Image (cartoon, rainbow, N blue to C red):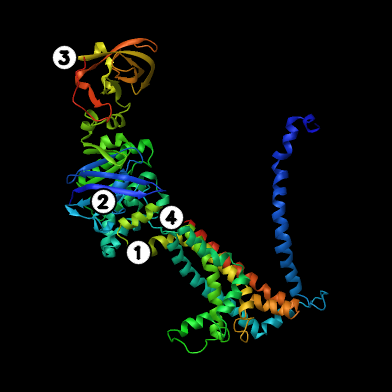
Amino acid sequence: MGITSLPASERRALSDREGFLAPLFLLPAVVYVVALVAIPFFLAIAFSLTDVTAGDPSLDWVGFKNFDDIFHDPIFWRALRNTLLFTAATMVLTVVLAKALAMILVADFRFKRLIRFFVLLPWITPVALAAISWLWMFDSVYSPIDWVLRQPGLIDGNTHWLARDNLAAISVIAVQTWRIVPLAAVIIMAGLVAIPHEINDAAAMDGAGFWRRLWEITIPLNLPVIGVATLFGAILTFTDMTVVYILTRGGPDNATQTLPSYAFFKGIGGGDLAQGAAIALFLFPLLLAAAIAILRSVRKMETL
Amino acid sequence: MALAVEVRGLKKHYRGHGDHIRAVDGVDISTREGEYLVLLGPSGCGKTTLLRTIAGLEEATEGEVLIGGNVVNGLPPRARQVAMVFQSYALYPHKTVEDNITFPLKAEKISKEERRKKARWAADLLGIDHLLDRKPRHLSGGERQRVALARALVREPSVFLLDEPLSNLDAKLRASARDELKQFQQNLGTTTVYVTHDQAEAMGLGDRIAVMSEGKLRQLGPPHEVYDDPQDTFVATFLGSPPMNLVPRNGHVLGFRPENLLPEEVVPGGGTKLGVDLEVGRIEFLSGDRHVYGTARGLGEETRVIARLPATVTTPIEAGEVHRFAVHEKDLCFFDAESGMRTAPQPVWA
């Protein structure tokens, strides 16, 4: 009964005060971001400027020595080039395939919901499990892909997908694309559904065929959403080390090494935390630039 | 060139959730060349589906669509020589007004020079030539409507299909746009099929009105005919504001317009008058007219009716009193009580 003795106005006060509630509700998100993003980020900057290793965790200032070292490391440059190449190739394939898939998904047909669920499956499968399945698909002796290609006599023997430089790179790109396409397709589909039906009807009345409609109406109106899907896909591909780690371990001979995987091998595998941090930091400016570029183009689209 | 549009036994059914929706359920209509035909009905009556089927955006479940005497079932919209203006105008938001207008010409492989010329011609005709470089979102509702019309016009189609093109305009603009639309169509002489749920638009624009309900054509005729001679109780009550009074009586239904129910002393003489005691409930003043709501007695079953007294009738009437009203015999309509269909006049004194 203690509460009822307070005047009604004061009892309401606490739950009505935005000045008190707003920070309270924001707190969990802030704690999350600080603990899992900000602290690791600044820790990585700190590591990259010291000689910290797994064996000697004391932070001794060495300036930009770590960066100097990795600039003279040909594997770093190869990893950087691979990261950009894999991301670019994956994004081109993703945009084309996801756009096509999205257009199929918005069409009306039987078992639409079931098909949509199956399309999303690669996305909801944990990356590590999916990568292990693909490892079996690309197996040097028992690859089912090779088996299929052998039946009509397209190849003799085995392809050794993951043992040759170019094929290994193609394999990584294929798995990344397979993983990202469902997400991108669903995002693009949402954008397609948002285009008013009457616009498509008007284009049909105006005599535009499929391709003219696609290039002059659907794609321009869909572009901001495609941009967002690309941004998500690019970041996911760019920062992913699981696929490379499980499929190729960066091999053969660093042919599929990427920045995240190389940072992992250097920092965790080799124990050189300082160099690992320095390599990983290279992801940041590139991601920032990509994010700004895409968000800018999206804004430009919106203010048409 | 104007071509006539005809639909024969047209049916359009949709498979809904478990049930069958008959959006258009056996409609026969044919326009004359250069005619302004209005499809009028409440929402969900199938008028828009009928229009879309004529356009080729929907395929008929059964029946035929003819344009200029040729069956066009199965032909895509672009092959039908029709142009359509949508309720939302459906302008391409990322294209300028000029690119919107020239878009239909691109499919016809017309040179860029020629396309620009045609766009100017269409824009001139509709008074939007100063807007050609703008994007649709910088235009007002009325301007958008004109751009949509220009885009429909630029291909010089044989038939215009208009789907509630005025419903997105505010009331004031709607009246003037209605006037312009009629002028525009008369100048071009193009056959026009116009869909609306607004009876004022239908009465004002249509050479003939096709009244639809529940996927069926209820009546087709000039505005005065559907108003004065409704074929059934649906048409009688859908048209007119306030709607026709319907009084059940001896196995049939007696109908009369509110403006024909007047105090007995002012009903013009000559011929027979049907007297009725009106217990006045409420009186409204609307644009100079008096709308008298009351209960009619001694005519048939006791029924709520409305009388519309023009400003020229000054008989004092008070709420709560019983006043003697009358309807002239020539203003009576008779309907079958079961089917609601119009029947021959019954002896009113029986």
Which residue is at the front of the view, B183 or B264?
B264
Kind of residue at badge 2 = Glu
Label 1 neighbourhood size at 10 Å, few (<14), some (14-19), many (20+)?
A: few
Residue placed under numbered mark 4 in the picture: A195
Q: Earlier in the sequence, mark 1 or mark 4?
A: 4
Residue placed under numbered mark 3 in the picture: B270
Residue placed under numbered mark 1 in the picture: A210
Gap between marks 1 and 4, in whole Å? 16 Å
Say if mark 2 contacts mark 3, CB within 8 Å: no
Identify the disc placed on residue B62. Answer: 2
Kind of residue at badge 4 = Ile
Residue A90 screen position, x and y as percent = 53, 73
Callout 3: SS = loop
Kind of residue at badge 3 = Gly
Q: Earlier in the sequence, mark 2 or mark 3?
A: 2
- The quadrant in which residue A107 appears is bottom left
Name the subunit of mark 4: A
**Which residue corresponds to the image point at 17% horizontal and 44% vertical from the top-left?**
B32
Say if mark 1 contacts mark 3, CB within 8 Å: no
- Left or right: B266 with respect to A93? left
